[in-house]
Image (cartoon, coloured by chain):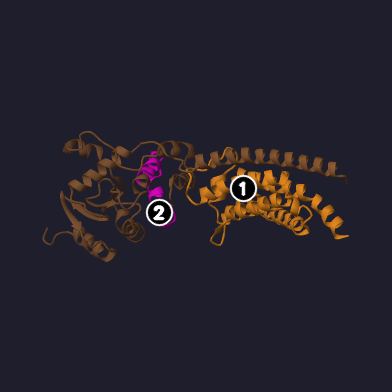
Amino acid sequence: MLVSVLSLVGFFVALYLWAHNAGLTGPIVCGVGDCATVQSSVYAKIGPVPVSAIGVGGYVALFVLSLAGLQPRLRESRAISALLLGGSALGVAFSAYLTYLEAAVIEAWCQYCVASAIIITLIFFATLPEIGRLRARGT
Amino acid sequence: MSRSEERRQSREGGTDMKKLYIVLGVVAVIGIGAVGYSVGGGGGAVSAPVTVEGLDDVNRLVELAQGNTKGDENAPITVIEFGDFQCPGCQAFATQVKPQLELTYLESGNVKFVYYDWPIIEIHPHAFLAARASRCAADQGKYWEYHDLLFRNQARWATLPNAVGTFVEYSEELALDGGTFRSCLESDQHADVVTANMELGLQLGVRGTPTVLVEQGGAVRNMSNFDWPTLQQYLEEAIAPTPGA
């Protein structure tokens, strides 16, 4: 359940950045850090795809999977447990890379990126019990 | 597990799911509200001409309309452009002709360059805002840097639904005070001057952008062809001393 709530929060954080990247918002509201520098850097996109759009997609996937895993029919699904665990681990790795870029390459911080990194890390910890479930169902 | 236990667990599960849906609903409402509020932000930024009293009076019009000048104020020849930051032709002039003009004639003090805003808002929705943005940058002493940055990045901001955020980012790129710039942009500051410039252009016969005029000794010539070789040839002739003089 925690994964669903955190994924939804993460989705809105990423959506705000995506909307800004698409020029749908006014100036980015950045109380702490230097969001404008980060968002206008070359690292804000991978090819033509904004990093924030990848975040939106990732959080939507985790949200849908977490809700699906709560349905009585799918509670025992190994596939959902594996996808939740793998997806959140991938998200943490990607966030760690982006955080490294902010700290060492861009040398500026975006509070929304940091918030997203914290959220995906919490999601990862919240999905750790899936390891036990995977083992139990595997026997 | 007995049937009664199964029913109890099922009831508890249903209650937990209801609580979850309530929490998700609250998060969704807050998230939609926050993102929705930010979309369309910068709504206070005036992006179209305003009503300015007295523009039909020539003296008042000349007083209110203000170009931005680059080069020696006392230069004998003035190249005047009526331009639109969102117009591709103006971008070509700004990136291909103006640098050569600066290098060849502005630095020597023979010519000065004056840029007047003439945004065609019917086809360029961000042009008026861009003109105001350049003047907000001028307030902090970086008009020409901002002017050049806008033209260099025209392709990036011209297609945005909302350019306010990007214009503020450009101000920060030029190390301007972002807060001051933003306050200026999200207001009607300089809208009167840009409007006056548009009216001045109309009075002078401007019908499209870029319109390039060359003024010397009170005589004004409209350069219908303003590519660099043509403009250079004209300026060379204008600068050269009259034979026998």
Q: Residue at x 72, y 50 (%)?
A: A71
- Mark 1 surroundings within 10 Å by alpha-carbon count, few (fewer than 14), some (14 through 19), many (20 or more): many
Q: Secondary structure at mark 2?
A: loop
Q: Secondary structure at mark 1?
A: helix
The Cα atoms of the two marked residues, 1 and 2, are separated by 28 Å
Q: Residue at x 78, y 58 (%)?
A: A78
Query: Given the image, on which type of amino acid does mark 1 rest?
Result: Phe
Which residue lies under the disc numbered 1?
A11
Q: Residue furthest top?
A: B53
Q: Is residue B145 shown in magenta?
A: yes
Q: Nearer the viewer, mark 1 or mark 2?
A: 1
Q: Position of residue B203 (x, y in %)?
A: 18, 46
Q: Residue at x 62, y 37 (%)?
A: B26
Give above or below for A39 relative to B232: above
Front residue of this view, candidates A16 and B198: A16
Do the residues under discs 1 and 2 have CB atoms within 8 angstroms?
no
Q: Main secondary structure of the magenta part?
A: helix
The magenta segment: B131-158
Q: Chain A drawn in what color?
A: orange
Q: Residue at x 64, y 51 (%)?
A: A59
Please say whether residue A110 is visible from this viewpoint.
no
Q: Chain B drawn in what color?
A: brown
